[in-house]
Image (spheres, rainbow, N blue to C red):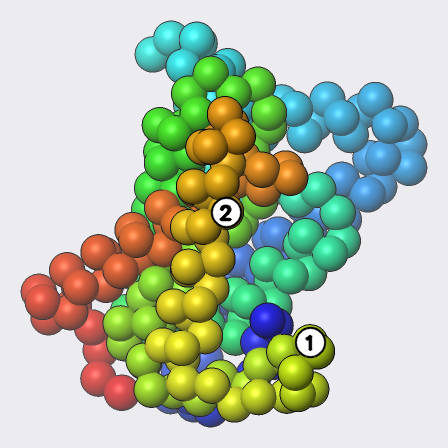
Amino acid sequence: MLPLWDENPTRRPPVVTVLIIAANLGVFVYEVLLGLQSPRAVDAFIWGHALVPGRLLAGGINSHEWSTLVTHMFLHGGFMHVAGNCWFFWIFGNNIEDRLGSFRFLFFYLLCGLGAAAVQVGVDPGSALPMLGASGAISGVLGAYLILFPTAWVYTLVPWIVPIVPLPAFVFLVVWFAFQAINGVGSLLSGTGAAGGVAWWAHAGGFVMGVALILWARGSGRLRSR
């Protein structure tokens, strides 16, 4: 399922949402330009800044590998990868930023990405596969959206059924999370923490992190009014 748009207006401009999208696109353009100059150069750039669980845990407390917990969020493996992430983030991120405020939203986003990475590393600590992409952090945004806007309408492209289907957000997001969890369990049964090159547990972990953080923010009165 692909979300196309939601019926959930915002009152304030989504400044941080736009900046994060711009940062992801900017880094991807740099990757493309680097690849045009030298395939080896772009491979070295990606491997140097992607999160590799086995390499991270073997590096020690003072290793520069810990910086990859953040840098991996801004790398992507192809146009569809970055385009899909940015599209999901645009649809769901602006409403969460509207409620949290720009600065809190930035910290929320980064914490969700860190939580997603921690879950993936915990599930497959010896992995030598590079983890890259904003999916884990964006999954946290989806988790927050489920809590704050469960009845908002999300117009969704559902192949093989009806071209466009309006769904309540809780239906779309619960189905989305179930898909991640099922694939995550499948990856464990196959003996790896990732299946088909996708870090399913990072998605699930980021989603749960987003739910937990937004519940804390709501309970502590850190949300702005609609």
Separation of disc 1 and disc 2 at Cα? 20 Å
Residue 99 shown left or right of residue 191 in the figure: left
Residue plotted at (35% across, 72% down):
145
Mark 1 and mark 2 lie on one chain; the one further toward the N terminus is: 1
Horizontal arrangement in the rendering, residue 157 relative to residue 106 (left or right): right
Q: Nearer the viewer, residue 55 or 29?
A: 55
Q: In the displayed structure, would residue 113 be above or below residue 43?
A: below
* Image quarter in which the N terminus is found: bottom right
Question: Which of 164 and 161 lies nearest the eye of the viewer?
Answer: 161
Residue 146 lies, in percent from the top left, at 33, 72
Question: Which residue corresponds to mark 1?
Answer: 159
In the drawing, does residue 51 fall left or right of residue 8?
A: right
Which quadrant is the C terminus positioned in? Answer: bottom left
**Circle 2 SS class:** helix
Q: Which residue is mark 2?
A: 183
Residue at the spot x=58%, y=42% of the render?
A: 198
